[in-house]
Image (cartoon, grey):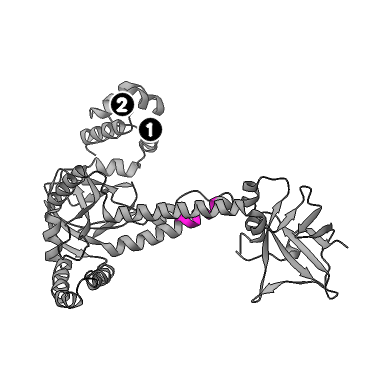
């Protein structure tokens, strides 16, 4: 092991963790002079101290030793791309999640490295990464966000040309940081179909020399289907013959864009398009990117729709939740009829069903505000016996109690230890 290489590595890791020599020494229960000797290559720590040091600096003893050997070269890969990044050097590949960074050992004898990059960006996975919802309201919001993010993922995948890029890297220094970003740019409406050509590609940020050698579209089927739809409808209101005449040429041009040469042509000009787009944004700051603007309008519409729906639900809670439960749970009022609580549900009763499924109706608690009644999760199922006597079974917090957490199936009446059962008052 090269003592000087080891010392430089310890110094670099210590500084990246914002620790002074004194602070690291206190953690390792040694003197700051000992840490200074290690970093100057005058000594190396004992194995037990080395293990504690590796844990403190969030690495392993093996990595510390390997990285300190002669003829070893490694690079730090940082994922600033998205949900998942795949980074391949020659025949070795590593995958990194959002914001993750990993060290990767490369052949020190080589000066030129072939790198393949592609990644995934999913808004739906970001929603799934959030904490589990704790109540009915959070579950409804989470469900709505999941549907919206899933829809947005499909739209992005149809409208943005996503690429897998192949690079050649030269002049890589040992322990060089290579950050991969998701560069998105618009080349404008090149085909006059009221739709911009939008591209997304993995961009490398590092100090070494980077050369793009190839590019492949990874969502070709989706973007091509969206192009055909847009190209066939862009001029229907103006001239059908013009649309039919122009479509073959537009189709030919779009196919050339999706080929490796076409993709490389646009990606090589990405900086130019980014600067151009930034200038246009400065001129008209209120004008947003069409995709972002569309998504923003849809999100605003959904928020307004949910707000109006909830507002009307609160106003009309008596109609939406017809069963009124007394505050002490002793009675239930339904229209002009009153039900009184009894101990248990008779054995010979049959639940009301619609298409073979039990019918559950929303209930509310008397004495609560309309808003609290609206967000209650109580439900009632109606039963009848052979004499046509009517019974009600009340389940409080319907979502949390009626669904079995392990199987995901609805519980039966006998699965509950405590019951709220009511019979029509005579």
Q: Residue at x 40, y 60 (%)?
A: 150
Q: Please say whether residue 277 is visible from this viewpoint.
A: yes
x, y percent for residue 394: 74, 59
Q: Residues within 10 Å of mark 1 (few under 14, many from 20)?
A: some
x, y percent for residue 220: 24, 69
Q: Residue at x 13, y 70 (%)?
A: 253
| Residue 8 higher or lower than 220, as above or below | above
Front-lying residue, 337 or 115:
337
x, y percent for residue 184: 23, 53
Q: Quadrant of residue 154?
A: bottom left
Task: Give the residue number, with chain letter if any, for mark 1.
Answer: 49
Quadrant, the C terminus = bottom right
Magenta region, residue range: 138-145
x, y percent for residue 210: 13, 51
Task: Give the residue number, with chain letter if any, for mark 2.
Answer: 35
| Residue 278 higher or lower than 91, as above or below | above
Q: Residue at x 13, y 60 (%)?
A: 264
Q: Residue at x 61, y 61 (%)?
A: 406
């Amino acid at each position: 092991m090269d003592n000087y290489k080891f010392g430089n590595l310890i110094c670099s890791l210590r500084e990246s963790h914002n620790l002074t020599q004194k602070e690291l020494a206190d953690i390792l229960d040694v003197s700051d002079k000992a840490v200074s000797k290690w970093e100057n290559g005058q000594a190396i720590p004992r194995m037990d101290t080395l293990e504690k040091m590796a844990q403190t600096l969030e690495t392993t003893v093996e990595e510390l030793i390997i990285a300190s050997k002669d003829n070893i070269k490694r690079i730090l890969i940082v994922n600033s791309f998205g949900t998942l990044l795949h980074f391949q050097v020659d025949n070795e590949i590593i995958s990194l999640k959002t914001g993750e960074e990993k060290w990767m050992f490369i052949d020190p004898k080589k000066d030129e490295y072939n790198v393949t990059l592609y990644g995934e960006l999913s808004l739906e996975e970001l929603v799934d990464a959030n904490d589990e919802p704790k109540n009915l309201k959070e579950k409804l919001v989470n469900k709505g966000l999941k549907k919206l993010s899933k829809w947005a993922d499909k739209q992005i995948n149809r409208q943005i040309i996503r690429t897998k890029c192949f690079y050649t890297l030269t002049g890589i220094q040992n322990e060089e940081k290579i950050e991969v970003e998701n560069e998105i740019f618009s080349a404008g409406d090149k085909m006059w179909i009221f739709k911009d050509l939008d591209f997304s590609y993995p961009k490398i940020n590092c100090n070494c020399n980077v050369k793009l050698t190839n590019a492949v579209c990874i969502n070709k089927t989706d973007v091509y289907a969206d192009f055909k739809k847009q190209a066939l409808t862009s001029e229907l209101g103006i001239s059908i013959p013009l649309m039919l005449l122009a479509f073959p040429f537009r189709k030919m041009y779009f196919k050339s864009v999706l080929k490796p040469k076409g993709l490389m042509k646009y990606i090589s000009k990405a900086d130019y398009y980014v600067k151009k787009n930034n200038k246009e944004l400065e001129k008209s700051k209120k004008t947003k990117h069409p995709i972002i603007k569309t998504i923003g309008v849809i999100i605003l519409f959904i928020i307004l729709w949910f707000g109006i729906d909830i507002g009307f639900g609160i106003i009309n809670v008596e109609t939406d939740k017809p069963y009124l439960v007394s505050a002490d749970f002793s009675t239930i009022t339904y229209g002009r009829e009153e039900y009184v609580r009894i101990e248990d549900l008779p054995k010979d009763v049959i639940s009301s069903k619609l298409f073979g499924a039990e019918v559950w109706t929303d209930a509310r608690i008397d004495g609560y505000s309309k808003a609290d009644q609206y967000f209650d999760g109580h439900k009632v199922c109606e039963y009848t016996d052979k004499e046509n006597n009517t019974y009600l079974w009340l389940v409080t917090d319907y979502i949390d109690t009626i669904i079995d957490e392990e199987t995901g199936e609805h519980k039966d009446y006998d699965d509950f230890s405590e019951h709220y059962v009511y019979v029509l008052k005579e």
